[in-house]
Amino acid sequence: MAISRAQLLKELLPGLNALFGMEYSRYGEEHKEIYDTEKSERSFEEETKLSGFSAAPVKNEGSAIAYDNAQEAFTARYNHETIALGFSITEEAIEDNLYDSLSSRYTKSLARAMAYTKQVKAASVLNNGFSAGVYAGGDGVALFSTSHPLISGGVNSNTPSTQSDLNETSLEAAVIQIAAWTDERGLLIAAKPTKLIVPPNLMFVSKRLLDTELRVGTADNDINAIKQLGSIPGGYSVNNYLTDPNAWFLCTDVPNGLKHFVRSPLANSMDGDFDTGNVRYKARERYSFGFSDPLGMFGSSGSS
């Protein structure tokens, strides 16, 4: 007795969804090392950075207390995109009992395609982080800039003044530079790096810089200060979707940095087409990647 299309859909869907999920998780997790994920209930999200207050003054006896007003520094906007793709299995393939092997292969390919797009879009924020224009943040400059404007009139810099390759000297300089960041009113925020993000080309350099007990590339018996001080407690993470083999990045503990908003989580569905007799399977999700406070990340494009 031939299996009906309705029965086929009912029996195939749970297995395909499970197969999709396993394959998707193999490729679609690297962004979690960089982004904080939040839910969204709107077609877009906006986050406004407030200036905070100036340093609290001394109140003399009998005098009135001083009041301050927080100001809006800038607004970052996240526009969600819908990502979707599907495949179909012909009625003839179903008749010839090919639906099982075909659907398995197609589902794995679909999962990889969806995961690939997500990781490319996530890495795009870093890959284009040294360019302004359409890639500029809410403060009007590139994600990585030496001139992030402050309400106080000063600037913050989250990139070296002269781009440098990843090495002991440049990494130590970055840690020191991050520690000097101030808020919009010019108050030190005691920022610290948390994790090093590198392309595959720099994974071996990162391992030596962060995990060796002694300094790299020297015969002296000096300790590796970066490791001993725990300057980068989260270690390093390799992102396979970074396009510049010399660029490297540091996540910091500054809140509201790089964010991933999920408007509609990944969903799979399957149905039959009456006219063609084909069975169709699709995947869809809706999300956005971006950054609110650029101080959530430090980056160097490398000197090469």
Image: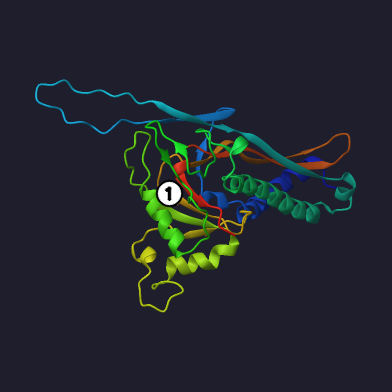
Q: Is residue 238 left or right of residue 267?
A: left
Q: In this view, does 247 lie above or below 288?
A: below
Judge whether residue 235 can be spotted in this image.
no
Task: Report the side of 36 relative to 91 (left or right).
Answer: left
Horizontal and vertical percent for residue 162?
Answer: 50, 53
Furthest toward the left, the residue is 61
Image colouring? rainbow
Coordinates of residue 109 in the picture (x, y in percent): 73, 52
Q: Residue at x 36, y 49 (%)?
A: 179
Question: From this viewpoint, which residue is outermost toward the front?
Answer: 162
What SS does tag 1 mark? Answer: strand
Q: Is residue 110 above or below residue 83?
A: below
Res 201 → quadrant: bottom right
Q: Which residue is drawn at 76% across and 43% down?
A: 86
As displayed, is residue 112 above or below residue 276?
below
Q: Residue 297: image x %, image y %?
A: 47, 47
Residue 9 as seen in the image, left or right of residue 118? right
Residue ID for mark 1? 252
Q: Position of residue 63 (x, y in %)?
A: 13, 21
